Amino acid sequence: MVQTPKRLTRQQSAVAEALRSGEDFTSAQDLHARLRSSGNPIGLATVYRTLQTLAGDGDVDVLRTDDGESVYRHCSTGHHHHLVCRACGKTVEVEGPMVEKWADKISAQNGFRDVRHTLEIIGTCSECPA
Amino acid sequence: MVQTPKRLTRQQSAVAEALRSGEDFTSAQDLHARLRSSGNPIGLATVYRTLQTLAGDGDVDVLRTDDGESVYRHCSTGHHHHLVCRACGKTVEVEGPMVEKWADKISAQNGFRDVRHTLEIIGTCSECPA
DNA sequence: AGTGGTTTTGACAATCATTCTCACTCGGGC
DNA sequence: GCCCGAGTGAGAATGATTGTCAAAACCACT
Ligand SMILES: [Zn+2]
Ligand SMILES: [Zn+2]
Ligand SMILES: [Zn+2]
Ligand SMILES: [Zn+2]
């Protein structure tokens, strides 16, 4: 077994930090632009690589906008879902134990295993006009 | 009030029919290739246009694969969700009244309006190997 | 400080689904 | 037959994401 080195580079910290300080879901392109303009030189490929790693480790949540862009957000640990404002991007984390149970039951009833699910709610928040 | 012209062209029928006869979610590219090779000349742009229209009218369901491809399927009318096999693509339509109620409640509690939600379950079906 | 081996980076090219363009075709009403 | 707008489609354009690969950064160890 080879020990996987785990170097924490300046670039990786920068991406993680940028995510941690942001409240809303952000695209890779946006992050890249923001980091650069805030005097933080980084390559686009590196941003994508880092985000993939973070997502794979479960340190950030990913979801895809309607126009196919992946957006990332630093989230609390543990399984949860999102309530997102389509206008301003405000995001609320929500949990639904009964939904989890329902999904498991449905899966079992149909003989599916290794199940995973995605559930997002999108609407307009109280602070945004119609 | 302007009368909306609604010409039903050969190409549109072909797409609708191809979807109606297929059981699983299919990509636009796939549909295009299939239609062509079955002696049904059609342009790729037309396939995309037609699918957009069908989806907009609620005649087909759309969801996005993990690699960002949109896939389409002719579905029963009414609001429902999907249980999809990640290996063979087998799809089961499922309903969850309690989930709908939960989503509405959560939305209301947080002051969100015009809410919509997406919920898909993905797993491996009983007929597919590990 | 130097050396060698490994990991990470980043500018740039490549991929690829989807959308755009726009000249052309079709078909029904006149 | 002629007209005209809806519909089509080949090819170009878009744009996010991924691949490439040489150069840079890092880490022992000397
Ligand atoms: Zn869940
Ligand atoms: Zn809002
Ligand atoms: Zn299966
Ligand atoms: Zn629902």
Image (tube, coloured by chain):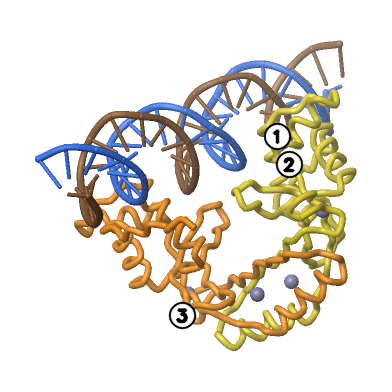
Chain colours: A yellow, B orange, C brown, D blue
Ligand 3 closer than 8 Å to label 3 CB: yes
Task: Decide: few, some or many residues near mark 3? Use Cα within 10 Å; few <14, some 14-19, many ≥20.
Answer: few
Q: Amino acid at mark 1?
A: Thr
Closest to the observer: A50 or B13? Answer: B13
In the picture, the disc for residue A129 is none
**Label pair 2/1, CB-CB below 8 angstroms:** yes
The residue tagged 3 is B127
Judged from the image, the secondary structure of the residue bearing numbered disc 3 is loop
Task: Decide: few, some or many residues near mark 2? Use Cα within 10 Å; few <14, some 14-19, many ≥20.
Answer: some
Task: State left or right for residue A115 relative to residue A54.
Answer: left
Residue lying at the far bottom of the rendered structure? A109
The residue tagged 2 is A50
Task: State left or right for residue D30 relative to residue A109.
Answer: right
Q: Quadrant of residue D2?
A: top left
Judged from the image, the secondary structure of the residue bearing numbered disc 1 is helix
Task: State left or right for residue B122 relative to residue C8.
Answer: left
Q: Position of residue A19 (x, y in %)?
A: 83, 44
What chain does badge 1 belong to?
A
Q: Amino acid at mark 2?
A: Thr
Rounded to the nearest angstrom, the CA distance separating label 3 from label 2 is 36 Å
Q: Residue at x 28, y 51 (%)?
A: B42
Q: Amino acid at mark 3?
A: Glu
Displayed-image quarter of ligand 1: bottom right
The residue tagged 1 is A46
Q: Position of residue B28 (x, y in %)?
A: 41, 55
Task: State left or right for residue A64 relative to residue C30.
Answer: right
**Label pair 3/1, CB-CB below 8 angstroms:** no
